Amino acid sequence: MIDHPLIYCNGDSYSDEDYHPSLKNNTYAYTVGEHLQGFVINHAKSKSCNRRILRTSVHDLIHQRQLNPEQKIIALISLSFDIRSEFWIEDANPTRVAESNFQTHIFTREYNWRELLLAGKDIDPTIINNRPDKKFFDKYSQGRAYYYSPYAERANLLCDCLMFQALMNQLNIQFLMFQGPKAEPLESEYLIDFFKSQLQKENFFDFETFGFVDWCYQQQRFEHLDIGRPETAHYGPDAHRAFAKEILIPHLEKYERRH
């Protein structure tokens, strides 16, 4: 049996140690790993959508449990923007085999994209690698935007979370899941309410009221790494350390006391 725990992290750019040189081995996962004297695997990837985060986490955590049947594993999963999705690119060249041929799709970079779409104007989708199939990409982005519903995205996300929870229980893996950027508040809806009611509160922070980025912004004591809106900025090692020490580690210790 391996004595040291494995700290596994996945998310988007807000958890990605490659986002900025100062974050290398300095994200919140490493502070948790140092506190618990554990090994850290950080597979967070910039521009990730929630489906990519959960799918690769499922792959990685099953694989790690197969490699080390008795090791203590703690997973820290940070979710991204609802608006992100993905598509399959036949000629993709993934850096990790577990990423396969999926690439993130973000149908707009504009805050007023609905008004632009209905007015027949460009909604400024994010083009990945400036691909030659731009006209089909634009049509796909417009259709995705037209039929987009945060309720559909949230219901599917919560369903995925519920299945992830069942898998983690089966694999005996402790986990915390939270938003990077806080999720859009939604009105009551049957499927959303039902799935949310099945989630174990000790494993999930409320997606609509809590997010890592929002927590950093509200502290008003951390420098951010970006030029632009501070409420959606990326924060440096000091914020990551504080988040681990003040939020994640106490939450994990409370879990241990209950079990």
Image (cartoon, grey):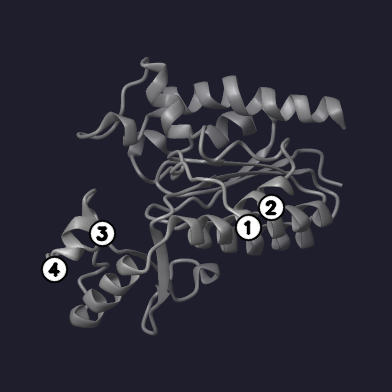
Name the amino acid type tagged 2: Phe
**Residue 86 horizontal/vertical position (percent):** 41, 68
Relative vertical location of residue 59 with respect to residue 220 in this rendering, above or below: below
Question: What residue would you read off at disc 3?
Answer: 108
Q: What crowding class fits label 4: few (fewer than 14 Cα within 10 Å), some (14-19), or many (20 or more)?
A: few
N-terminal of the pair, mark 3 or mark 4, is: 3
Query: Would you say residue 171 is visible in this rendering?
Result: yes
Could you say which disc has been placed on residue 120 in the image? 4
Q: Is residue 26 visible?
A: no
Residue 87 picture quarter: bottom left
- In percent of width and height, residue 52 lies at 50, 62
Cβ–Cβ below 8 Å for labels 3 and 2? no
- Disc ID at residue 151: none
- Which of the marked residues, 1 or 3, is nearer the chain's N terminus? 3
Element class at badge 4: loop
Using the image, tell me which numbered label, if any, was put on residue 194: 2
Amino acid at dot 4:
Gly
Query: Tags 4 and 2 in contact by the CB under 8 Å rule?
Result: no
x, y percent for residue 66: 78, 62
Q: Which mark is residue 191?
A: 1
- Tags 1 and 2 touching, CB below 8 Å: yes
Q: Secondary structure at mark 1?
A: helix
Alpha-carbon span between mark 1 and mark 2: 5 Å
Q: Is residue 220 left or right of residue 204?
A: left
